[in-house]
Structure formats: C-alpha cells, structure tokens
Image (spheres, rainbow, N blue to C red):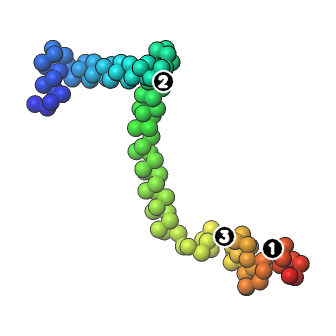
Amino acid sequence: MQLVERYAAANGMTVEQYLQFANQGFEQQAVAQLVAQGVPEPAAKDLVAERLRLDRERRSIAPLAAQQRAQQEQREKLSPLDGAAAGVSRHEGAAARGGAARGGRGNTACGDAGL
C-alpha cells in the first residue's frame, strides 16, 4: 500500500479526498505566509489561486512544449545548414548577413560610398 493510500485510509477518506484535503492545507498555509508578509487576505487568496492556475497550465503545456522541441530538433537534423533547401540563394543569404556573395562590402554605407 502506498503512503498516500495509507494516510487516506487512516483518515477515513479516499485517495482523491485526501489529496484535495492536503491541497487545501497547502493553499491555506501559502495564504497565511503572504498575510504574515503584509499582503491583505483577499489579495493573498487571489494570488495563491492564480499561482495554482498557472502551475496547472504549465504542467499541461509541458508535454506539448517538449514534443515541439523534439520535432524542431528533428527538423534541424534533417535540413541542410546552408539554407539552400529553404530556397535562399547564396547571394540572398550573404546579403541577409550583411556581406556580398563574393567577398565584397555588401549593403553597408561604407561599401556603397566606396570607402
């Protein structure tokens, strides 16, 4: 039997009920800490509720973000580094980097003025 199951059974609760009870205790403790720091109680309750909402949101988004990172890494492994597959010519790529395709000065003010 797991620890949480034992605690729930000892208190005459289901695991779900016990977890809700424990979470309420944590929330009340967090509110009390904020109030002790001078935060008005209504604002402290709102802040704790918002933090919990953000935490749930982050946990629900984390698997999706990990999947997107893995897909991006896979795409980067499959695509060539020179940009040719993206339809960028060597000249366009050099111009985007501020240089000319064949070692010239590119599109800088000094290059245009011949300095």
For disc 3, the marked residue is 87
Residue tagged 2:
47
Mark 2 surroundings within 10 Å by alpha-carbon count, few (fewer than 14), some (14 through 19), many (20 or more) = some
Quadrant where the image shows the N terminus: top left
Mark 1 and mark 3: Cα distance apart in space: 21 Å
- In the rendered image, residue 83, in percent from the top left (x then y), is placed at 61, 71
Q: Nearer the viewer, residue 12 or 83?
A: 12
Q: Circle 3 — which element?
A: loop
> Which mark, residue 32?
none
Q: Is residue 100 left or right of residue 37?
A: right
Where 84 sits versus 32, above or below? Answer: below
- Residue 107: which numbered mark, if any? 1
Q: Amino acid at mark 1?
A: Asn
Identified at 62% across, 68% down, the residue is: 86
Where residue 97 sits, quadrant-wise, is bottom right
Q: Is residue 43 above or below residue 68?
A: above
Give the mark nearer the N terminus: 1 vs 3.
3
Could you tell which of marks 2 and 1 lies nearer the N-terminus?
Answer: 2
Mark 3 near mark 2, Cβ–Cβ under 8 Å?
A: no
Tell me if I can see residue 19 in this picture: yes
